[in-house]
Amino acid sequence: MTLPRDLLDQAGRLLTHETKKPKQASLRRAISTAYYALFHLLGSEAGKRMAPSEPKNIEFQMQRALEHGTMKRTCQSFAGGTLPLPLQHLVTGTIEPELRMVAKDFVDLQEARHPADYDLIHTFTKQEANDRVEKAKEAFSNWASVRKSPNAALFLVALALPKMYEKRG
């Protein structure tokens, strides 16, 4: 899990290396990097859990198959507790609050990344960027507390295999 943790650390460093008046580029990169830290954390976890050990490095190919928009929709579903019917019977008990927060934070961070990467009119404050980096740190912590639960496994499968539950035309 080196890359996700390194990205999270880098997002924090981007906020501290210009102490007086951080450049917009640094604030934007911190927000975007915080999102990608969580994206890669969940992708790495899905790859490790779902990919066979052979052929070598297949888990990395699996991670490449994850799609941002699909992951966002899945996270919205888990965060709101409104799972599609095919997933509802697979939930063990209730979805843990920490898992719901990971899902919610993913959505929030992705929505913050878009203007950070593409909206050149928007000006970010250091506080806004710091809030996003802290949100990513909380998501990492929440994930660590639920990652071995059956519902976390279901969440990872749903992120990676959306056709398992999406309506087919």
Image (cartoon, helix red, strand yellow):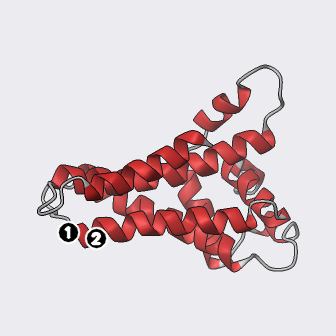
- Does residue 78 lie above or below 63 as drawn? below
**Residue for point 16% across, 55% down:** 24
Q: Where is residue 156 in the image (x, y as percent from the top left)?
A: 72, 53
Residue, disc 1: 125
- Does residue 29 lie above or below 101 as drawn? above
Side of 65 where 117 appears, left or right: left
Side of 103 where 165 appears, left or right: right
Q: Label for residue 128?
A: 2
Sort mark 2 into few (<14), some (14-19) or many (20+) by Cα contacts within 10 Å: some
Quarter-wise, where is residue 150 in the image? bottom right
Res 76 seen here: no
| Of 101 and 158, the residue lying toward us | 101
Q: Where is residue 69 in the image (x, y as percent from the top left)?
A: 51, 52
Q: Label for residue 158?
A: none
Quarter-wise, where is residue 155 in the image? bottom right
**Residue for point 62% across, 51% down:** 42
| Of 80 and 139, the residue lying toward us | 139
Could you tell me the amino acid type at mark 2? Glu
User: SS at mark 1?
Assistant: loop
Could you tell me the amino acid type at mark 1? Thr
Q: How far apart are marks 1 and 2 (CA)?
A: 5 Å
User: SS at mark 2?
Assistant: helix
| Of 37 and 123, the residue lying toward us | 37
